[in-house]
Image: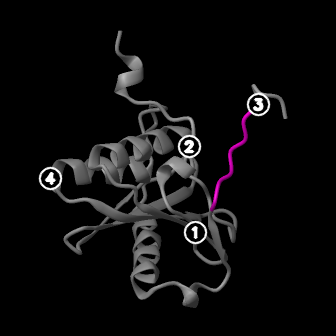
Amino acid sequence: MSEFEKSITIQYSLISDRSTLSVENQKLLKSAQEASKLAYAPYSKFHVGAAAMLSNGEMVTASNKENASFPAGICAERNLLNYISDHYLGQKIIALAVSANPVEFELNEPVSPCGICRQVMCESERLQNQPYQILLGATSGTVLIFNSAASLLPFHFYLKELKK
């Protein structure tokens, strides 16, 4: 590796037995799965739910919403984070779970948030001055656990980079 080359390592946990998760994380993942049933996804038929555990102990959920006027829809993760920022001022996110539940095929592997959602998640961590745990799962199968949104988007940017 030359002096100009750098390396990034992303650490995460791969959990194949969900019963080994903490009770809180099992509940969080289950809430995300339940939220996916509320999705409005008539075009992609790819239902996604997200759930967050807040510092006050409350759990909040949201789902993805599509629209015939593409790309007017919103992902479950951004729907959830926007709702929390409007309705839970001062509450920090401790953990966030995402669960995908496609209608037309089976999915046993976790699905990662899109790039826009990753950026919004990173900024929400920055705004609360605290990272939060992220659990990615499907309706069954393995679960990936990350210790921060920055682990999902190592080269995120913030307002300070945009100032002149």
Chain-order first, disc 3 or disc 1 = 3
| 56 versus 23 height, above or below | above
The numbered disc on residue 153 is: 2
Q: Quadrant of residue 154?
A: top right
What residue range appears in magenta?
Answer: 6-11
- Label 3 and label 1: CA atoms lie apart by 33 Å
**Residue 161 shown left or right of residue 138 in the figure:** left
| Circle 4 residue | 89
Does the image show residue 74? no
| Circle 3 residue | 5
Q: Quadrant of residue 35?
A: bottom left
**Residue 116 shown left or right of residue 6 in the figure:** left
- Label 2 and label 4: CA atoms lie apart by 25 Å
Q: Nearer the viewer, residue 32 or 36?
A: 32
Question: Of the residues shown, which amino acid type is indicated by label 1?
Answer: Gly
Chain-order first, disc 1 or disc 2 = 1
Determine the residue located farthest toward the right in the rendered image: 1
- Label 2 and label 3: CA atoms lie apart by 19 Å
